Image (cartoon, grey):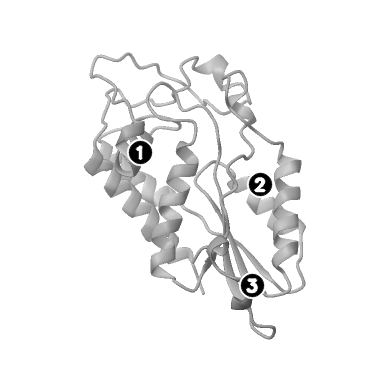
Amino acid sequence: MKLKQIKSTYFKENQKYDFLFPIGSTEQHGAFIPFGTDTYITDYLVDKISKEFPELIVLPTLEVSRSEEHRGFYGSLWITEETLKAVMFDICNSLKDRARNIFITSFHANGSYIESFIKENNFDGVNIVHLEIEHEEDDKVIEQILGGEMDNHAGNSEISNMLVIDEKLVKVPSENEPKTQVDNPFETDKLIEKCPNGIADNHPKWIVDKEIGKKILDIYVARMIENLNI
């Protein structure tokens, strides 16, 4: 259930609750999918999880996060790592009195910041958990589905995911659309210097398909369900 849809009388004084805190992003995703792609995907996955765990209370998604690697692409929004951690602290602190578990999840690459935040903070016995979406074993399966390397950003898998979520927001690349090989696209916070088109996908072909997108999203949902221990 969504926190913004329930009333204050839902919470009982002597009861503990489980919360899901989703973090998205608003950043460039090239010419084919929108700035909100990571938020759309996060929200899609969270909605699926919410149906599996109806008592889990879902917080409003934080739509701006640590995306400084996209500086130089106009329209990308970001906050610093310190600001992101401060926001996570304030949110967790506001919930701690009635919380049993607070699961923080993000499709965007916020994992290292979430992990370090959890290590650095304590909330009076509340269990703060990074609910991971991606796993290296799943990546191997996705590469088999794609028949080649998985994209790092805004390529085959993410475009296919968005076809499932809202195909009106997607421009499907033509087979002849040029692709650029990019080594270690996120080794610095200057992605634009590595790939001026904003797409980091070393697969030799465009493999964009709604059915592929659904298979990939189902893999992510299954991993989240496995990791969600309540």
Labels 2 and 3 touching (C-beta < 8 A): no
Q: Is residue 201 left or right of residue 114?
A: left
Residue tagged 3: 8
Upstream in the sequence, badge 2 or badge 1?
A: 2
Residue 33, placed above or below residue 40:
above
- Distance Cα–Cα, label 2 vs label 1: 25 Å
Q: According to the image, label 1 marks what residue?
A: 162
On screen, 58 above or below 187?
Answer: below
Q: Is residue 26 above or below residue 72?
A: below
Query: Can you give x and y, in whole percent of width and height, for residue 135 in the image?
Result: 44, 51
Q: Nearer the viewer, mark 2 or mark 3?
A: 3
Residue 134 in sight: no
Q: Residues within 10 Å of mark 3 (few under 14, many from 20)?
A: few
Give the label, 2 or 1, closer to the camera.
1
- In this rendering, position of residue 77 left or right of residue 174: right
- Label 3 sits on a secondary structure element that is helix
Q: Is residue 211 visible?
A: yes
First in residue order: circle 1 vs circle 3? 3
Kind of residue indicated by mark 2:
Tyr
Image point 48% across, 22% down: which residue?
Answer: 183
Q: Is residue 83 left or right of residue 226?
A: right
Q: Residue at x 74, y 42 (%)?
A: 83
Q: Label 1 sits on what residue type?
A: Met
Marks 2/1 in contact by CB < 8 Å: the verdict is no
The mark found on residue 113 in the picture is 2
Viewer-side residue, 7 vs 45: 7
Find residue 82 and report its horizontal and vertical position in percent: 76, 42
Position of 230 compared to 146: left or right? right
In the displayed structure, 87 sits above or below 166; it is below
